[in-house]
Image: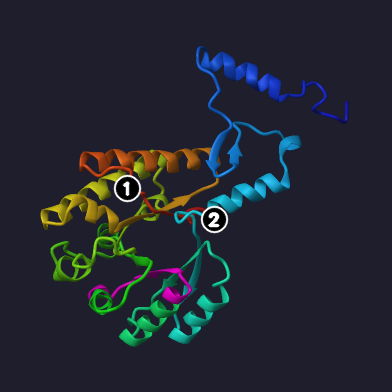
């Protein structure tokens, strides 16, 4: 037996790929490639190993990190404010990060939260607070804080589904305190939690359906309270889990962005007014 078990296969080249693409596209062409994804940074439609250059890869990665929409999420479990502030200081050299703080059942004091937010604002770092319970206390505390970039990681719908903890949208906490802030405030207060569905076995199509249904319900509730669709969208962000089916997961994220914009358009919110912020987690379904 031949030791080289691949010898019977003909090596595939980029020219072979182009021929197959031409057959698939028929009358369409690939003339719009390479695609300029940033200033003087171009991306081709297909690369072979021989075409990959370390400098080009670095330029692409750097262009992503210079975007306000690109953040690496660093997590820390809250124990005390000095510990979190030290964590922020130690990571302040990187401009592409955000800090995700897992809050304990007992809400930190107003002074402790303000110290954390002040340090994050000084370092221009977004801080997200992952809320377990004590929801009302958290919102009451945040009402009087000077908020910068970041948000509260809380989805009332999945919180109710997972813990039977009902958080009415017309609660004064939402209606009078958080949304009373300036619409331009970069601090977001509602998370559409797609992780909840993924990590309970939903397939990508089901995930998208649940996430978008959640989004529409949330928007309807908020606009019924007199909040404009644009202001409501600016308060919302998304958290999504991805598994190991990489091409499928990439397609899911692209479809999610597209469909969010489709929904925004029905509320007369244009892409120029709203860029969806999507936080991506590694799946825990298989752990």
- In the displayed structure image, the side of residue 278 where residue 191 appears, left or right: left
Query: Is residue 284 part of the magenta span, yes or no?
Result: no
Which range of residues does the magenta coloring cover? 120-136
Q: Quadrant of residue 193?
A: bottom left
Q: Is residue 80 visible to the viewer in this orientation of the structure?
A: no
- Mark 1 lies on a secondary structure that is helix
Residue positioned 47% across, 38% down in the render: 251
Residue 263 percent coordinates (x, y): 26, 41
Q: Which residue is mark 2?
A: 65
Residue 30 x, y percent position in the rendering? 55, 23
User: Between marks 1 and 2, how big is the CA–CA gap?
Assistant: 26 Å
Asked which secondary structure carries label 2, the reply is helix
Q: Choose between 71 and 17: the one closer to the eye.
A: 71
Could you say where residue 22 lies in the image, as x and y percent from the top left? 58, 16
Q: Residue furthest front?
A: 40
Q: Is 133 part of what is drawn in magenta? A: yes
Q: Which residue has dot 1 on it? A: 211
Report whether 126 appears left or right of 109.
right
Question: In the rendered image of this protein, does residue 13 appear above or below residue 226?
Answer: above
Task: Determine whether 73 is above or below 263 in the image.
Answer: below
x then y, percent, for residue 141: 26, 79
Assign the N terminus to one quadrant of the image. top right
User: Tag 1: Cα neighbours inside 10 Å, few (<14), some, or many (≥20)?
Assistant: many
- Please identify the quarter of the rendering in which residue 272 is found: top left
- The disc, 1 or 2, on the residue closer to the chain's N-terminal end is 2
């Amino acid at each position: 037996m031949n030791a080289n078990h691949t010898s019977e296969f003909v090596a595939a080249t980029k020219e072979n790929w182009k021929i197959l693409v031409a057959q698939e596209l028929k009358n369409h062409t690939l003339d719009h490639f390479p695609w300029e994804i940033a200033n003087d940074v171009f991306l081709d439609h297909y690369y072979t190993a021989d075409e990959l250059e370390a400098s080009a890869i670095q330029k692409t990665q750097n262009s992503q990190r210079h975007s306000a929409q690109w953040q690496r999420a660093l997590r820390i479990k809250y124990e005390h404010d000095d510990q979190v502030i030290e964590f922020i200081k130690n990571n302040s050299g990187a401009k592409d990060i955000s800090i995700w703080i897992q809050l304990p059942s007992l809400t930190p004091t107003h002074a402790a939260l303000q110290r954390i937010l002040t340090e994050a604002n000084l370092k221009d770092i977004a801080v997200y607070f992952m809320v377990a319970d004590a929801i009302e206390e958290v919102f009451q505390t945040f009402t009087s804080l000077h908020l910068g970039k970041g948000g509260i990681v809380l989805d009332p719908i999945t919180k109710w589904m997972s813990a039977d903890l009902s958080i009415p949208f017309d609660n004064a906490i939402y209606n009078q305190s958080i949304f009373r802030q300036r619409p331009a405030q970069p601090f977001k207060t509602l998370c559409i939690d797609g992780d909840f569905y993924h990590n309970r076995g939903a397939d990508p199509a089901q995930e998208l359906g649940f996430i978008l249904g959640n989004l529409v319900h949330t928007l309807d509730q908020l606009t019924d309270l007199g909040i404009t669709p644009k202001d409501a969208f600016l308060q919302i962000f998304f958290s999504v889990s991805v598994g190991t089916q990489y091409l499928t997961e990439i397609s899911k994220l692209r479809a999610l962005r597209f469909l969010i914009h489709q929904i925004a358009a029905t509320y007369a919110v244009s892409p120029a007014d709203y860029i969806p912020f999507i936080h991506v987690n590694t799946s825990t379904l298989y752990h």
